[in-house]
Amino acid sequence: MKLKQKYSAGLAIVYNKKVLLLHTTGRGPKKSYGIPKGGLDSGEENLEAALRETYEECGIKVPAKMVNKTEHTFVVTSRKYKYNKVVTYFIVEVKDLKEIGLKGPDIPKGQLQLKEVDVAGFYDYREAMDLIMQSQAPVITALINNGLI
């Protein structure tokens, strides 16, 4: 079976030893969260896509200067939908939520792209490992290994 190759980009946003995770609309409560991410538009660079998708999905505008430009990746393979997706993500350390336009750690529902995301918030590593999709668990592991969460 030939799998279609896809590419996606996102941000692992860390604040106060917690990571921002989004719940995928229509999925169950566990193992259905992930970092903000999405597909690359034609001619778009990974960082551009990561910033755009984060804003589209959860209304958070991250200044490019805050992003650690080191690229990290994980791969998602879906035999059901016949694709192999390489996801590039960047780490963002936030000292003050005002830097990304938030008043507090809860993301207002009105900012969410509800057809894709119905809940968004910051979670510590134990909650994150419980909630995150299996394919994205390497993101949490990398954040733990770097002492960020």
Image (spheres, helix red, strand yellow):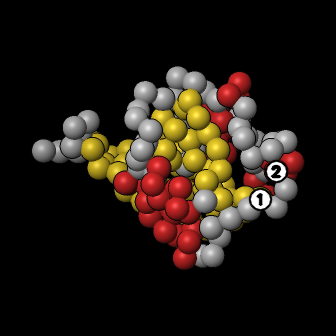
Q: Quadrant of the C terminus?
A: bottom right
Label 2 crowd bin: few (<14), some (14–19), many (20+), radius 10 Å:
few
Q: Residue 50 placed where, x, y %? A: 61, 47
Task: Give the residue number, with chain letter if any, for mark 2.
Answer: 97
The amino acid at mark 1 is Val
Residue beneath the point at 43% across and 27% down: 26
Residue 9 in the figure: left or right of residue 112: left
Distance between the alpha carbons at the discs numbered 1 and 2: 6 Å
Residue sitting at x 44%, y 38%: 29
Of residues 118 and 116, the one nearer the viewer is 118
Mark 1 closeness class: few <14, some 14–19, many ≥20 residues within 10 Å: some
Q: At x 56% / y 30%, what residue is drawn? A: 118
Q: Which residue is mark 1?
A: 94
**Element at badge 2?**
helix
Residue 130: quarter of image:
bottom left
Q: Point out residue 136 in the picture as x, y percentages from the top left corner.
A: 44, 55
Q: Is residue 83 visible?
A: yes
> Which quadrant: the N terminus?
top left
The answer to whether the residue labelled 1 contacts the one labelled 2, judged by CB atoms less than 8 Å apart, is yes
- The residue at the far left in this view is 1
| Up/down of 56 relative to 48, above or below | above
